[in-house]
Image: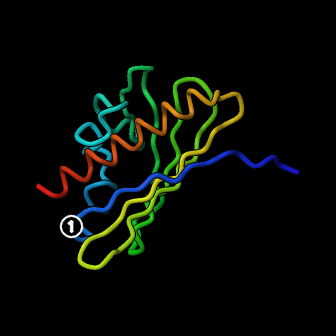
Amino acid sequence: MTKLMHSQTLQVRIENSPQTVYEYAVNPENFPEWTTSFSLSARQSGGEWLVETPDGPMGIAFAARNEWGVLDHHVRPASGPELYNPMRVIPNGEGCEVHFTLFQHSGMSDGKFAEDAGMVQRDLETLKRRMEK
C-alpha cells in the first residue's frame, strides 16, 4: 500500500470571472508575472514549456484545456522526480477562487514544506492582484 503524503490546500478569492482567470493562469508565458517566487522566464522548447527557475530549467505540462477550470499540472525539475500539482479555478458568485494543493513529498522536511506553502500562497496573492487590476 502506498503511503499518503501530507498535503495543504492553499486558496485565494479573486474578483474576476473564472474564465478570465483560467485563461491567464493556464498560459505558461504569464508565469513570470505571477509565479514570482520561482519563475524567472518561460519559453517553449520542442513542444514543451520550460520555466527558468533559480534552481535551473523546469518542464511544465498542464491538463488539456477544459471548461471546468482544471489547471492540474506536472513539473519536471532539472533534478528529482516529476511532481503533480492539482490546481482549480472555481466559480464563486461573480468571481472565483483558485485552489492549489501542495504535497509534502518523501524526503521533504517540514521546514521546506512550510517554505513552499508560503511561496505558493504569495504567488496566489500575486495572481489575485494581477487579475483584479
Q: Residue at x 36, y 27 (%)?
A: 52
Looking at the image, which is closer to me, 123 or 118?
A: 118
Of the 4 image quadrants, the one containing the C terminus is bottom left
x, y percentage for residue 118?
A: 43, 37
Instruction: Name the one closer to the observer, 120 or 38.
Output: 120
**Residue 115 % position (x, y):** 48, 30
Location of residue 94 (image quadrant):
bottom left
Q: Residue furthest left?
A: 133
The residue at the point 46 percent across, 57 percent down is 87
Q: Residue at x 22, y 40 (%)?
A: 33
Q: How is the image coloured?
A: rainbow
Residue lying furthest right in this view?
1
> Badge 1, how many Cα within 10 Å: few under 14, some, many 20+?
some
Q: Position of residue 112 (x, y in %)?
A: 56, 27
Position of residue 132 measured from the top left corner of the image (x, y, whole percent): 16, 58
Q: Pick whichever, 72 or 89, lies toward us.
A: 89
- Mark 1: which secondary structure? loop
Q: Is residue 37 above or below residue 95?
A: above
Write the residue at 52% across / 55% down: 86
Q: Tell which of 107 and 110 is nearer to you.
A: 110
- Amino acid on which disc 1 is placed: Asn
Which residue is identified by label 1? 16
Left or right, 131 with respect to 71, comes to left
Question: From this viewpoint, which residue is outermost toward the top?
Answer: 55
Q: How many marks?
A: 1
